[in-house]
Image: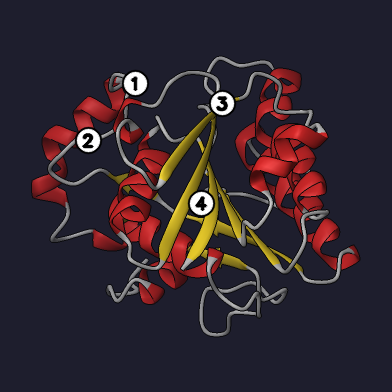
Amino acid sequence: MSHIIITGATGLAGSAVLQSALSSPAVSKISILSRRPVPAAEGNPKANVIIHKDFTSYPPDLLSQLSGASGCIWAQGISSVGMKEDEYTTITKTYPLAAAEAFSTLPGNFNFIYISGRGANQEGKAGQMFGRVKGAAEKALLDVAAQKEGFSAYNLRPAGIDPGKTWTAERKQGMIEKTFFAIAPVIRPFASGLFTPADKLAEVSIQLALGDGGKITGDAVLPDGYTLENPAIRRLAGLDCRD
């Protein structure tokens, strides 16, 4: 029975993680860091929503509420479309890095699960803004883990996140998401490797958050052992690994 921390619980990936954690007998307590109430958690004794406005700061009173947590699933994020790079970097890199630094001071071993994305590039020299910033965040988290004994960071790179038959996120669907939702039943059988089911991404995230913090081996795992491409995520979820 474990205590985990979740961010982004009102988004597509985060809401799936929350639902999976609420139903998991392996999770006894869920601390949800959110800027606003999380309706999906209301009334559930396992869930504690902590209204947190500044994701660059983790004062002692907040960390005391998180004490005993064995992992964090960082599902907070935003589309890079139409954003300036400095603003996107703050949300995508600065926020999770600040959290990782703070959570690494909590007692006991700790696993930090960062929901990144397909196309992330840790080299950071070229490519789309999304890939460069996500990759920089991944690398920074791995650097924190390398310096903190008992602290592990996993970077998950899902492809298109497939919500399945039910849209669980609090926010409304964007146009791209509406289009995907409409055509997904036709696409899934022929291009399954291009997608990551939200519920399976959630299961793998929780599995890693509760795990021993060790390296993952196999195809589609970067040499660091902690950065997993979509086929590796699908494999851990018991799905086919086509990409």
Residue on which disc 3 sits? 80
Secondary structure of the residue carrying tag 1 is loop
**What residue lies at 52% left-to-right and 48% top-to-bottom?**
117
Tell me if mark 4 has few (under 14), some (14-19) or many (20+) residues whose alpha carbon lies within 10 angstroms of its own.
Answer: some
Q: Nearer the viewer, mark 1 or mark 2?
A: 1
Real-space Cα separation, disc 2 to disc 3, in angstroms: 18 Å
Q: Residue at x 21, y 26 (%)?
A: 178
Going by the numbered disc 2, the residue's amino acid type is Phe
Residue 74 in the image: above or below residue 106:
above
Q: Callout 2: few (<14), some (14-19), or many (20+) C-alpha neighbours within 10 Å?
A: some
Task: Give the mark nearer the N terminus: 1 vs 3.
Answer: 3
> Percent x, y for residue 169?
31, 31
Element type at marker 4? loop
Q: Which mark is residue 171?
A: 1
Q: Give the residue type that dot 3 points to.
A: Ser
Q: Which mark is residue 122?
A: none
Residue occupied by mark 4: 118
Quadrant (top left/top right/bottom left/bottom right) for the C terminus: bottom left
| Residue 180 - label | 2
Q: CA distance from mark 3 to mark 4?
A: 14 Å
